[in-house]
Image (tube, rainbow, N blue to C red):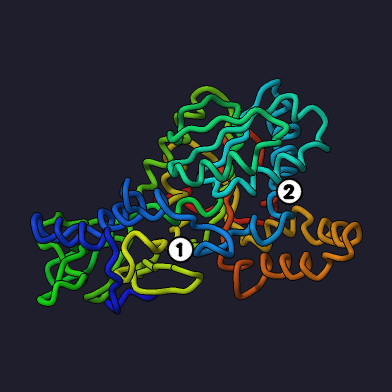
């Protein structure tokens, strides 16, 4: 990952963060990420058009409409066959971007008898800019749509999508030192440029010694608030059955490593280069996420790769029908599907897990998967 200090752009948020550091001392990496992403006046998600060819990155639903359509059909099957067709169900998306995924998903559910009569849409969004784009995308939505900023805040039965959502959550980073594990932070060097440092007095995470007994000095471990996410799903599940699909780039083993990265204009740069004007993300630790979800009482299906999941839902067959119906777009459709399934790209780097209330049967799309996180 590109984490070495480099050329810094003179952004408004950079001035603010440097003033905070000069006044209060180094800030933990999680605090730096939170400011960069969510500062009310200068934060990336709070102020920027982040998605699409004119933004900084493109998600799967922007690459091909079949991605959202397959998730819509998946939701219809879950409602009908897994949940037994309850008379009301909420179709929820965490971090819905421009609303493209949900728009395509809802359109696809027209073929599921009774689903649209039972369903309503809930979008969980913090960005006012993206909220406006979602309203535009879903202006003709066949289902009633509401918005909220709370990961809970709605009642089950609920079917939840979380695509490229957790990778943007701030993480704490811990560094192995001769004196044990210490928190990593952002400071200023003698020239006033951002640099990483270590907080010697910021607590000691001794459980890392048990999990990574052979880690050499300098090793980095990242910790996301998995328990907060699991607690939110548990709060929703208190009112009825919950089924969720989580799709993100990440890894499935309990591993150490620095995955912090910045993306601006579809290119990587130092996380210090453009505070507030670049997307900061880390890879999702699916192992720790699975442990937290199990401890919250959920059953899991997966993980599988994105290619395996979409393949099991019939993406190739659906794309073939779409190309036959739209021959003038056949090349575009084929290129998009290839990108979603690429063995050395999105197809393998993105992982998928299913989350369900313990009394629900296994979710579709995970038949060949090995469940992780049941211990620990």
Give x and y (percent) for residue 88: 67, 22
| Residue behind mark 1 | 253
- Is residue 294 at least partly visible in the picture? no
Query: Which residue appears at 88% of the width and 57% of the height?
Result: 321
Density class for disc 2 (Cα within 10 Å; few <14, some 14-19, many ≥20) is: many
Is residue 287 depicted above or below 102 in this figure? below
Counting labels gives: 2
Give x and y (percent) for residue 79: 70, 33
Label at residue 46: none
| Residue behind mark 2 | 69
Callouts 1 and 2 close, C-beta under 8 Å: no
- Is residue 59 at least partly visible in the picture? yes
Query: Which residue appears at 71% of the width and 66% of the height?
Result: 336
Is residue 155 depicted above or below 293 in this figure? above
Query: Which residue appears at 10% of the width and 63% of the height?
Result: 200
SS label for mark 2: helix
Give x and y (percent) for residue 125: 48, 41
Left or right of residue 364, residue 6 in this image: left
Query: Which residue appears at 73% of the width and 48% of the height?
Result: 69
SS label for mark 1: loop
Spatial CA distance of label 1 from label 2 is 30 Å
Quadrant location of residue 30?
bottom left
């Amino acid at each position: 990952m590109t984490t070495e200090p480099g050329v810094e752009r003179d952004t408004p948020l950079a001035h603010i963060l440097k003033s905070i550091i000069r006044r209060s001392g180094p800030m933990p990496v999680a605090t730096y990420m939170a400011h960069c992403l969510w500062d009310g006046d200068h934060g990336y998600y709070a102020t920027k058009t982040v998605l699409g060819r004119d933004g900084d990155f493109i998600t799967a639903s922007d690459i091909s409409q079949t991605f959202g359509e397959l998730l819509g059909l998946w939701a219809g099957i879950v409602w009908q066959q897994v949940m037994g067709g309850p008379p009301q169900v909420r179709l929820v998306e965490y971090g819905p971007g421009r609303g493209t995924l949900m728009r395509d998903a809802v359109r696809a559910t027209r073929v599921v008898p009774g689903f649209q009569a039972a369903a309503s849409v809930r979008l969980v969004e913090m960005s006012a800019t993206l909220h406006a784009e979602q309203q535009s995308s879903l202006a003709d939505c066949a289902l009633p749509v509401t918005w909220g900023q709370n990961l809970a805040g709605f009642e089950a039965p609920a079917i939840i999508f979380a695509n490229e959502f957790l990778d943007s959550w701030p993480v704490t980073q811990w560094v192995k030192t001769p004196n044990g594990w210490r928190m990593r932070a952002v400071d200023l060097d003698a020239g006033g440029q951002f640099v990483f440092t270590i907080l010697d007095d910021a607590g000691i995470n001794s459980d890392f010694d048990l999990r990574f007994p052979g880690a050499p000095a300098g090793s980095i471990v990242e910790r996301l608030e998995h328990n907060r996410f699991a607690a939110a799903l548990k709060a929703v599940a208190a009112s009825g059955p919950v089924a969720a699909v989580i799709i993100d780039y990440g890894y499935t083993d309990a591993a150490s490593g620095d995955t912090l990265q910045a993306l601006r204009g579809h290119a990587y740069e130092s996380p210090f280069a453009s505070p507030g004007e670049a997307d900061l993300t880390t890879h999702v630790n699916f192992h720790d996420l699975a442990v937290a979800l199990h401890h919250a009482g959920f059953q899991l299906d997966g993980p599988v790769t994105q290619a395996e999941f979409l393949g099991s839902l019939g993406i190739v067959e659906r794309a073939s029908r779409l190309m036959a119906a739209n021959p003038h777009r056949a090349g575009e459709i084929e290129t998009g599907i290839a990108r979603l399934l690429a063995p050395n790209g999105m197809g393998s780097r993105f992982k998928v897990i299913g989350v369900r209330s313990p009394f629900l049967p296994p979710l579709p799309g995970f038949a060949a998967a090995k469940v992780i996180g049941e211990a620990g």
